[in-house]
Image (cartoon, rainbow, N blue to C red):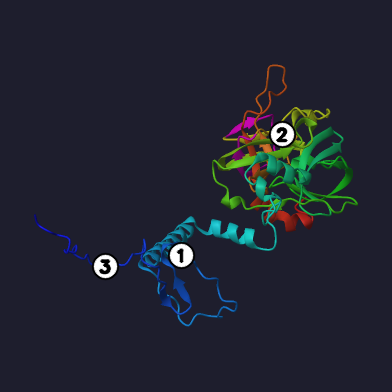
Amino acid sequence: MTDFQDQQPPQQPYYPPQPPYAPTQPITTEPGTTIWPSGGHVPPPPADPPVAAAAPAAAAPGSRRRAKRGVGLLAAVAIAAAAVGGGTATLVQQLSSDSPVTASSVVNGTNVSASSVGTVAGVAQAVSPSIVEISASSNAGKSTGSGVIITSDGEIVTNNHVISGASSISVQLSDGKTYEAEVVGTDPDKDLALIKLQGASGLKAATLGDSSKVKVGEEVVAIGSPEGLTGTVTSGIVSALDRDVTVAKDDDGGSQDQQQGQQYDPRQGWPFEFGGQQFNGDTGTSKTTYKAIQTDASLNPGNSGGALINMKGEIIGINSAMYSPSSSNGSTAGSVGLGFAIPVDTVKADLDSLRAGGDS
């Protein structure tokens, strides 16, 4: 039997106890910048932080990549803004300026508001106050036509055949006010006349446009007093340019009713000739021919002397003739879309002569 009482068990090496994780150590990158990993305690900022760091901290690689993408995005936005064009730049400038942009601002050189340019309603609202109804009385009776106010003190352009031979002239404005008028000058060769209201002031004058820029197919508006219906508005297009239209120069070559000494029938269109044919009666022996703008805007007796207007609200012609087919009872059947207007450039060139008395 073996005795093991004096034997000692072998000694095991001693290992001191270890903490469950290594102690967190601060990582210092730059003076004043300390990062505590693993969500350790972040000490509060110093009471008096420095005004400026000694040197900017180096950006991490990820930050540099994000910065490059930001610059690229800004560049793309700038290129897109430049591609939009000056209209957007103007809008931005207007919105950022101190002065507000209003929809009622008037388009430069015209009477039409910016929000109504290109609409019949906008043109009608702007120009109607400048269109008048003319009633001319003579020994042959009474006739009705239209006119266009061109000065605030009451100068009005109309057709010569509207006031030719009149002993008295009465003019009604769009607001219903009535004035007596006198003839300033006439030009029978161009079928134009200038009259002046007595005692008028502060009237709304129309804007005279440029008929040399008128194109076939362009939209137009006609305003006048057909059949005595003051301020009637119709619309259409320019059908043709430079039409040779022939009309009577004086009242002695006027309608058949006038030649017979009967009262003028406003349903009868003023007689004119075109292409060697006579329309709406005999023009008589004393006649004149001029180049006219043709339009399909509805014109009827009483529109003579009224305005043909472009979509900017500018007068481009003075309505002067229309074709109206006769019915079996001798009266007319109304407009069929064949109307003619004296170009406004002819009117402007003749104004000084009309103001001096014209060729009458």
The crowding category of the residue bearing disc 3, from other C-alpha atoms within 10 Å (few below 14, some 14 to 19, many at least 20), is: few
* Mark 3 → mark 1, Cα distance in angstroms: 32 Å
Quadrant in the picture for the N terminus = bottom left
**Amino acid on which the number 2 mark rests in the picture:** Trp
Outermost residue toward the bottom in this view: 54
* Mark 2 → mark 1, Cα distance in angstroms: 102 Å
**Depth check: 335 or 165 in front?**
335
Task: Describe residue 203's horizontal placement relative to residue 218 as left or right.
Answer: right
- Compared to residue 185, the image places residue 319 above or below, namely above
Q: Are marks 2 and 1 in contact (CB under 8 Å)?
A: no
Residue at the spot of label 2: 270
The answer to whether residue 293 of the structure is visible from this angle is: yes
Residue at the spot of label 1: 40
The percent coordinates of residue 42 (x first, y second) are 50, 68
Q: Are marks 3 and 1 in contact (CB under 8 Å)?
A: no
- Residue at 62% from the left image edge and 40% from the top image edge: 245
**Amino acid on which the number 1 mark rests in the picture:** Gly
Residue at the spot of label 3: 14
Question: Is tag 2's residue or tag 3's residue first in the polypeptide sequence?
Answer: 3
Outermost residue toward the right in this view: 199
Q: Which residues are magenta?
A: 276-297
Q: Is residue 93 magenta?
A: no
The percent coordinates of residue 339 (x first, y second) are 64, 36
**Depth check: 37 or 223 in front?**
37
Q: Secondary structure at mark 1?
A: loop
Q: Secondary structure at mark 2?
A: loop
